Image: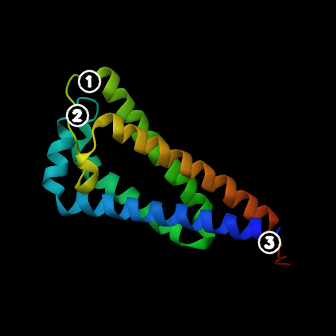
Amino acid sequence: MKTIKITRSIIMDIILVLYMVLFLYAALMKLFDYQVFQVQISRSPLIMNYAATLAWFVPSIEIIAAILLFIPRTRLVGLFFAFSIMFAFSAYIGYMLIFSPSLPCSCGGILSHMGWTEHLIFNICFTLLAALGIGLQTKTTKSAPHVSLS
């Protein structure tokens, strides 16, 4: 039983670190090349009208998600947030692959070297990691002893 808890804890730590690194890296790349990021997303037919807002909103939510994942009390909320972000990014990429003749890339750094299909697979894998993390965190929370505040 103790081995299962340790394994669960290690898997959870790996998921959290992967997500915190991903979100902070992606957000910082977007902010460091803010003008380039804004121009790139303004070329997307789906979101071009919201480019100015999204250029600040996307890196902001990535940073907020990383902070939520770092704080133990907000970790489950952070995992739901991460799942939602990655699901939305995956849906956007899927839509672009199906319906858009031009595919402007607004990713920075290492991620910009991926093709759109690879990026979709990457995002789906991270979405599944968030779902696994939610399941593990929920089990951990349910099995932890409850302390009464009264």
Q: Residue at x 14, y 45 (%)?
A: 39
Answer with mark 2 or mark 1, whichever residue precedes in sequence: 2
Q: Position of residue 96 (x, y in %)?
A: 31, 29
**Residue to which mark 2 is pinned:** 44
Query: What secondary structure is marked by label 1?
Result: loop
Q: Give the quadrant of the N terminus.
A: bottom right
Q: What count of labels does the image hold?
A: 3
Is 24 situated left or right of 43 in this image? right
Do the residues bearing badges 3 and 1 touch, measured as CB atoms within 8 Å? Answer: no
- Residue type, label 2: Ser
Q: Nearer the viewer, mark 2 or mark 1?
A: 1
Mark 3 and mark 1: span between their CA atoms? 51 Å
**Residue to which mark 1 is pinned:** 100
Q: Position of residue 144 (x, y in %)?
A: 79, 70
Do the residues bearing badges 2 and 1 touch, measured as CB atoms within 8 Å? Answer: yes
- Residue type, label 1: Ser
